[in-house]
Amino acid sequence: MLRKLCTRLFFIFCIPLILYLLLTVVFIHESARQWISIPKLFQQMFATVRSVGVISAQKTTFFLKNAQQPVIIGDYFSVIIETRNSTGQHCKSGGDFWFATIRSHKGNAAGKVIDFNNGTYEVIFFAGWTGKATVEIILVHPSETIDFIEEKLWPMKDRIIWKGVFSYNKKHETKTCRFGKQNEHLNQCVHSYPLALGQTVFLCEKPQILSCDTLISLKSVSNHVEKKFSQLLHENKALFSKDVTYARLINGPHAIEIISTGSSSDVANELMLPECTADLPTPLSDGFWIKNIWTSLQCKSKQWSKEEIMQCVKGKQFYFMGDSTTRQWSQGFLELLNLSTSQFTKIPNIKLTYHNSDVLNLTFHFHPYTIARRSCPYRIGRWEYEIMDNLNSSTCNYVLVISPWAHYTQWVKQDYIERLYLLRDTILRLRERCPKTIFVVKTPKPRNHKTGTSLLYTGDGLLYDIREFFFKIFSGLGIHIIDVWDMNLAYPSSNNIHMPMQVIYQELQMFFSHVCKM
């Protein structure tokens, strides 16, 4: 009897209510001409109900694993993070993005974060010096923000556009340019580079008078970027609020004490590190800073003297290809050999540097289609295939550094991934012709964000993704991957796009340890 009564009440009250809600939703979306499927509707309803940034940096705790045991110089030790929500309850899922460092006046190091996908994380540190060290655990983004970056931000088109100037015979026209696909080129000028971009092409509105081949310069449109991302940031401000964005954890040990056992202070040598070769395994810690010297824990690196570097580079041709962070490498290379002011060092434009002498043969090329405040001549840069496919096969004494990343966070992800796979094909073509060529890939690094919108167009979540793309696409091919992420994160200064030259010199010391014989 009771079951029948409940069934009757369900049909009398619940069924009409459900129908009313569905009809209301259909009416609303029909009036807006935006039909939506019921499963998708419930997905959106769930997303709205779910609190943004379930994790609370104010409530999340961290503690030293095996706290009863001392932290001894030369040992690895761990910090456990237990994420909690605003009510103090333990979160049950992972996917949050962290920065973790230990810092002191003696040294600095970054920790490797292990995600157990249950709301708990383990951060592994290496104790590279003695004394008190401050522990910094920073929530960069909660998992909800990472999901937004992956699902919404990366696939967005037209996150960067250029103004292209067409000019011929004293006639000038300015048109909007962007990247797109070949099937989007109706009534547009198409610039295609299939060996570099595949199906992606550079499109410009057609000039009214001039021809497409009169494009002479490009300038990225910064106000378009700010306007587009300001609106996006406003619509998703909860995802990037200061409570869950670069928020330092406060519920845990402020500092640890690293003690000595009286043994050798050369802790790196005691670990019996491998030689610096291609395809090295990921270490538990990349290394640590002692003042301005980086000690690698990935492989057996050293501080190379000027004389040793000169001996190493003799008879080799170096080609550096990338962005302004790779240009810093070429600058640092010249400075370490006291060649910056040499008569043989030439800088014809901001996209090209070269030095050809008995001491060094070095050329730096910037890639095309850069994002910059100033207007640049069209195609002033060079694609990697334009350089590598034209290298002479009779010598094959090449060392190539490749690092295209800083200008690509505003690309559609799949377009950029296609570019990286085509770059890999270019490397393999040259390797077939010149098997002894040394290939080096330099990873991205974290960078400072001076505006809220920069979290969207150059965010560390995007840059860390690019780092992972590099490892996925270039690993297992005998390519030396110089991972500078933790080195830059640990350095005791702001993570600017252009780090102090002391950092660049240490990155180059890692480079020499990979390409030179000990």
Image (tube, rainbow, N blue to C red):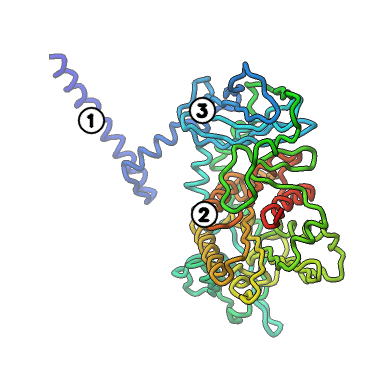
Q: Residues within 10 Å of mark 3 (few under 14, many from 20)?
A: many
Query: Quick one: label 1 or label 3, which is nearer the N terminus?
Result: 1
Q: Quadrant of residue 207?
A: bottom right
Q: Residues within 10 Å of mark 2 (few under 14, many from 20)?
A: few
Disc number lying in front (1 or 2): 2
Secondary structure of residue under mark 1: helix
Q: Position of residue 492 (x, y in %)?
A: 76, 38
Query: Quick one: label 1 or label 2, which is nearer the N terminus?
Result: 1
The residue located at (56%, 53%) in the rendering is 470
- Do the CB atoms of the residues marked 1 and 3 lie less than 8 Å apart? no
Number of numbered discs present? 3
At label 2, the amino acid type is: Gly
The residue located at (73%, 53%) in the rendering is 508
| 50 to the left or right of 83 | left
Residue 22 position (above or below residue 70) = below
| Picture disc at residue 15 | 1
Q: Position of residue 284 (x, y in %)?
A: 59, 37
At label 3, the amino acid type is: Thr
Disc number lying in front (2 or 3): 2
Query: Quick one: label 2 or label 3, which is nearer the N terminus?
Result: 3
The CA distance from mark 1 to mark 3 is 42 Å
Residue 117 position (above or below residue 60) = below
Q: Position of residue 264 (x, y in %)?
A: 75, 31
